[in-house]
Amino acid sequence: MEKNKNIYKNRKTFIHPKSTIILSIVIILIFLSSTLSKATDNTVISPENWSEWQQEDYWDWHTRTTTNDKAYNGRHIVIQNDVIDFYGYGQNSYKDFLYKEYKNKGKKTFKFIIDETRANYHTLDGAGFIFNADIKDDKMSGYILLFRQQDISVYRVDNVDVNEFENTGYRTVEDYGQLINRINKTNKQLRELLVEASPTKIRVEEDKKEILNLDLDNSIHVGESFGLISSYVQHDCNILSKIEFSQLQIIIEDYDIKIINTDLEENSISGAHFVVRDENGKIVKFGKTNNDGTFKVNNLQAGTYTIEQTIQPSGYMLNKEIYTFKITEEGKIVDTEDKEIELIVKNAPYIIEEENTEENDKKEEENKIEEKQPVEEKKEEKVVTNQKDHTVSKIALPYAGGVIILLRLVVILSIVASIILFIKLKIYKK
């Protein structure tokens, strides 16, 4: 009896430690997995706190670093997080600018603050933005907006030699371009500013009040590139000209189209697939509607396009209509008659009865024939049917598969029981 107890104890020692170790490892892994997931979630950088423009390689730099200037030595445009500083010259004065080549039409928005108490306009011609621009064969065309000491000025430049513009002293932006508009500044010391530039308009707000709204000539629109610029007047002294744009945000809104998918009652539905083709039939975009029933397509150039639904939403019939629309130079969506439109694609609900019309008609015809049969004939038919249903062959065949499954289950359980018994015997012998 004592021997059996020892064997039992040994068996417990043989089985349980491994089980305990495995269980512990599983618990630890689950805990670590949960902890790592939380750590990862907490260290992810939110897109809202990231600005691509703050990276040096985002821009083409057309500026210089001085080492023997009377007023300032170093870079003359400096980006530090959301602050950009423009530093002037003590001797030769130049124009410095950052340029971003960009191809997609859309609205560019610049939000920033100027603290006039920290600005020194001594030789500063102005600092601001380049927009609706293009550089081709080292010649730049577009618009330049400058915040100057007394005013805000908008210039148009055409085919200006970039090297000359960047490296020639004694000349201001106005020497290279045409003044389009100029407004006087207010006496405020702290300015909260917003500049919006689109292919057809430039707007400026100060403290959320519009102070400039200028329509642009779209016929001379050359590009979508943009940048930051500072310009200085020639002089020779050690006084540093400087201006700072703080809390700067650059927001780019590419023109896009929005396909809205609804049912016949204009309730949004999701899950449909669409394909967009250009006027030559080439596929330029394809995708699926999101949860609110919209499919957005951006980065399209001006031209004519078609939209076609390729896969319908679940529970609805495919809409086979091909929709034609145009994108104008101003980024508007219009129909073939140049009327501004919304792109709404509707789907009819999927009705099973409609697809089984022939089958339903056949069943309905059979029911009519059956109703015309005499009552006695129906009773006789029912008796015959009952007799056939109770024959041995009809009962045995449906359950033949069940018996086979049962037999297989018994065999499997027998094998498992044999393996367990074999393990127990092995343990007992030890």
Image (cartoon, rainbow, N blue to C red):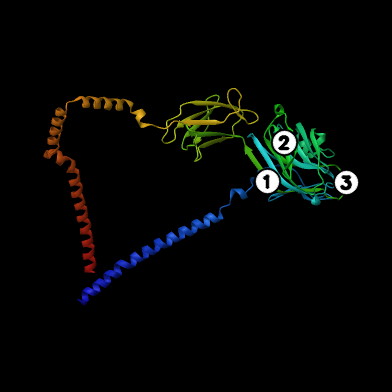
Q: Quadrant of residue 330?
A: top right
Q: Mark 1 highlights which residue?
A: 249
Secondary structure under the numbered disc 3 in the rendered image:
loop
Query: Is 365 positioned to the left or the right of 134 in the image?
Result: left
Residue 130 vertical position relative to residue 324 in the rendered view, above or below: below
Image disc number at residue 202: 2
Name the N-terminal-most of marks 3 and 2: 2
Q: Amino acid at mark 1?
A: Gln
Residue at the far top: name it.
Answer: 337
Q: Residue at x 52, y 34 (%)?
A: 260
Residue 248 image point, x, y percent = 70, 47
Measured in 3D between alpha carbons, the distance from the residue under mark 3 to the one under mark 2, in whole angstroms, is: 36 Å
Measured in 3D between alpha carbons, the distance from the residue under mark 1 to the one under mark 2, in whole angstroms, is: 17 Å
Q: Residues within 10 Å of mark 1 (few under 14, many from 20)?
A: some
Name the N-terminal-most of marks 1 and 3: 3
Q: Residue at x 88, y 48 (%)?
A: 237
Q: Nearer the viewer, mark 3 or mark 2?
A: 2
Please say if the residues under marks 3 and 2 sit with CB atoms less than 8 Å apart: no
